[in-house]
Image (cartoon, helix red, strand yellow):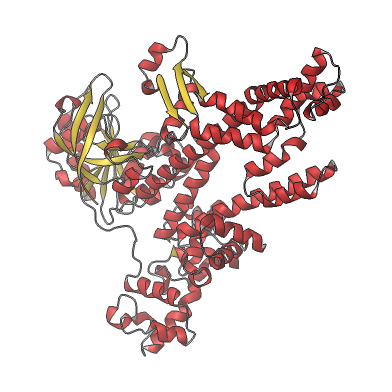
Amino acid sequence: MNKNIASAVAERTALPIKGVAAVIELLDEGATVPFISRYRKERTGSLDEVSIRSIETALKQVRDLEGRREFIIGAIESVQAMTPAIRQRLIEASSMTELEDVYAPFKPKKRTRATIAREKGLEPLAKRIMSGHLPPSSDDEIAGAMDIIAEWASESSRLRNITRNVFNRSASLLCTVAKGKEEEIASSSLAQYADFSQSVRRMQSHQYLALRRAEREGLVKVRYSLGEAADNLDDSLCRAFVPRQASGECREIIEEAVEDASKRLLKPSVENEISASLKENADKVAIDIFSANLRQLLLTSPLKGKRVLAIDPGYRTGCKVVALDAQGNLLDEGVIYPTPPKNDIEGAKRILERLIKKHHLEVVSLGNGTASRETERFLKSASIVEPSKIFIVSEDGASVYSASELARKEFPDKDVTVRGAVSIGRRLIDPLAELVKIDPKSIGVGQYQHDVDQTALRNALDYTVMSCVNSVGVDVNTASERLLSYVSGIGPALAANIVAYRAANGDFKSRRDLKKVPRLGDKAFELCAGFLRVPGGKEPLDNTGIHPESYGIVDRMARSLNVKPADLPANDSLLNRLDLRALADAGVGGIETMTDIVKELRKPGRDPRTDDNSGAFVPEIDDFSQLSVGRTLPGVVNNITAFGAFVDLGIKENGLIHISRLGRRVNAVTEILSLGQRVEVKVIDIDSARKRISLELLSSAK
């Protein structure tokens, strides 16, 4: 491994070089972030998953930079323009911007005004003007020479840096309504950007993404303004570029060329750079928030051991209802019409009572879509189940799943309404197992997800899903193909092979049986085995997060206490007697690994998701008309964005706690609130026309 690469990554991440180098080696060997963070702690110095992920990200950036550096060096050498000074600048460049500045004069260009002037043989004239000598020349010749000088100015690293610095200090983005779009923007969600200005330095991520959307939709025009700094910029550029020996007419020509370069080349180029930087930063904030929301949603506590009545509410077409056992298997289905236009309350009550009695259903999972509140009122007034047993579940993405190829494979003889209702029920039983079947962008917990870089978003969300799946662990005998595909070292192809082998040969009896799966070799087994569970198998440790490579350590732990390995799980009295330091000194294993093993043995087969399920949220209101300024209400946080948190109050419309009421730091919202958190809020403003509710946070409970 290149030591310079490791040093550069360590510098970017502010992490110890030894640990960084170890992580890079493991990544290059094909290891995954979850595997490294969990099973290679001694090698990395116990770096956590966040640190290892940051190393993985920084490593790609550094290698991309090195690849670009090598290309530029080769390109300049190919035109025989390399000098020791240029090479040194390229070697010392620590960013893409610095590299591109050095490369700018040598980069192949399209046909420009300066190119045309050179074709006319005017470059010698331009050089003489720069040296302070102006031979007799026509106006056209001088104009051509000025085009060449302007291009030289635009390629100057010094002038580009001066322009960047002025823009970063003084530039603002000004937004004006496009002609004829006044009424359209006034009635849109982007109305606040009709007459908007903000300095580049203070631009918030959500503001910039909203501006870009408004501009893309043709509602506004956006431009940069330097204000009073514009004139000072041109003066600074001229002072930095005009040679001392140039005076009189030569100085005037060069200054005019620099001003032309500033207006025509430098400013537009720097504006593009700043726009790209603002977009990149805005994307990162939005993607980070989306990922954090998704993680919280995926790690929602499952409602284990309960048989579920799942309801997908509706009006004209009725409410689709399904009965599911505790594993999420479909037992029965039906349709009820307790909402308008039929209002068949008694008929709906009879059907539900029959399903509940026949299948011993214990809780209700009710989708939060159309007619949800009316259906909830019916359930409570009919006294079919206790209100505390009614759970409102997000429907976001259920329709996407129900129409997917995966859903058709699971329920080939059922229509989309049944599949959607099953998904709603399974989200209560095991949110993680069900939500991994859906494109994360369809789950509805982000902001501007269609405006950010789609590749970066997909990579971040896929990583988040993988991280959550591996932190929980997967039952290899019940997991879907999609869930298995996110396990470390497996992927879609091996997941399909595992499911096919399971279907042909029955349940896996041990982790070792995984090696019988076609194409699942030693490396894949090493990466996945610790994250796969085999409940009730021949080896009790197969139902823990202890990796098979460490079973020998467990055996030596047991022998140190004169007991059998099977005596250790869930036996605190024995585990408390273990002397890990003495075992480490004896070469049994590393302290970090043995500490993790003991943790797993204390609660074998545990689910790291909290077992505390706080019950159903019982709202105090069920209609927008019941709101009033000053009223306090209970609610549940159901989405977090860079500009605030949305709160479910029990009605169709969500309320917003704006970031200005939480703190203006970028991460203020995520520091204070989390998805699914119970809160008490006060209504501070109501916009009845646009059905918007402004809230103030009074208290919250983790």
Is residue 668 found left or right of 694 in the rendered image? right
Image position, residue 360 (x, y; %): 21, 51
Looking at the image, which residue is at 21% across and 23% down? 342
The answer to whether 416 is drawn above or below residue 119 in the figure is below
The answer to whether 530 is drawn above or below residue 682 in the figure is below
Image position, residue 447 (x, y; %): 40, 35
- In the displayed orientation, state which residue is furthest to the top: 180
Q: Nearer the viewer, residue 551 or 350?
A: 551
Is residue 419 found left or right of 650 in the rendered image? right
- In the displayed orientation, state which residue is furthest to the bottom: 562
Q: Is residue 499 visible?
A: no
Looking at the image, which residue is at 47% across and 10% down? 179
Q: Nearer the viewer, residue 415 or 518?
A: 518
Looking at the image, which residue is at 34% across and 61% down? 607
Q: Nearer the viewer, residue 60 or 272?
A: 272
Image position, residue 369 (x, y; %): 30, 32
Image position, residue 194 (x, y; %): 40, 19
Q: Is residue 179 visible?
A: yes
Q: How many marks?
A: 0
Quarter of the picture holding the N terminus: bottom right
The answer to whether 517 is drawn above or below residue 388 in the figure is below
The answer to whether 668 is drawn above or below residue 262 in the figure is below
